[in-house]
Image: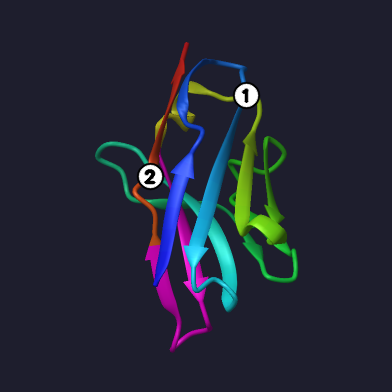
Amino acid sequence: QVQVVESGGGLVQAGGSLRLSCAASGSTFSINRIGWYRQAPGKQRELVAGIGSDGSTNYADDMKGRFTISRDSTKNTVYLQMNSLKPEDTAVYYCKVVIGSRPYATVYWGQGTQVTVSS
């Protein structure tokens, strides 16, 4: 019903920037919020940033000031602008789309996009 596709990952040097995109398609009219998460090998998946249908945003402390999440409602697309990248930012970045609200929410995950930051 809802498809989620991430793009924009790649290999960058420390201090560089990347812009990730999360495109949602299908029955997207009732999206509650979209979040970016990341998971490094051997680590638990963690929140990076989220944005609500009203445009409100939240960030994990480690990403505050470096990353910016934004949305384009017309295109059902959310972006994650990542600046001042560090090697510890290396991870697979996933987009999570939430339809509705808890406890009745439906969650859709993308396949992830690899971000690698070299020293």
Up the image or down, 80 lies above or below 60; here it is: above
The image position of residue 95, as x and y in percent, is 47, 53
Identify which amino acid the numbered label 1 is placed on. Ser
For label 1, the SS is loop
Identify which amino acid the numbered label 2 is placed on. Gly
Which is closer to the viewer, label 1 or label 2? 2
Q: Is residue 102 magenta?
A: yes
Q: Is residue 84 magenta?
A: no
Nearest the viewer among 100 and 88 is: 100
Q: Residues within 10 Å of mark 1 (few under 14, many from 20)?
A: some
Q: Residue at x 61, y 52 (%)?
A: 78
Which residue is under mark 1? 17
Numbered circle sitting on residue 114: none
Up the image or down, 112 lies above or below 52; here it is: above
* Magenta-colored span: 92-108
Q: Earlier in the sequence, mark 1 or mark 2?
A: 1
For label 2, the SS is loop
Numbered circle sitting on residue 112: 2
Q: Residues within 10 Å of mark 2 (few under 14, many from 20)?
A: many
Residue found at the very far bottom of the displayed protein? 104
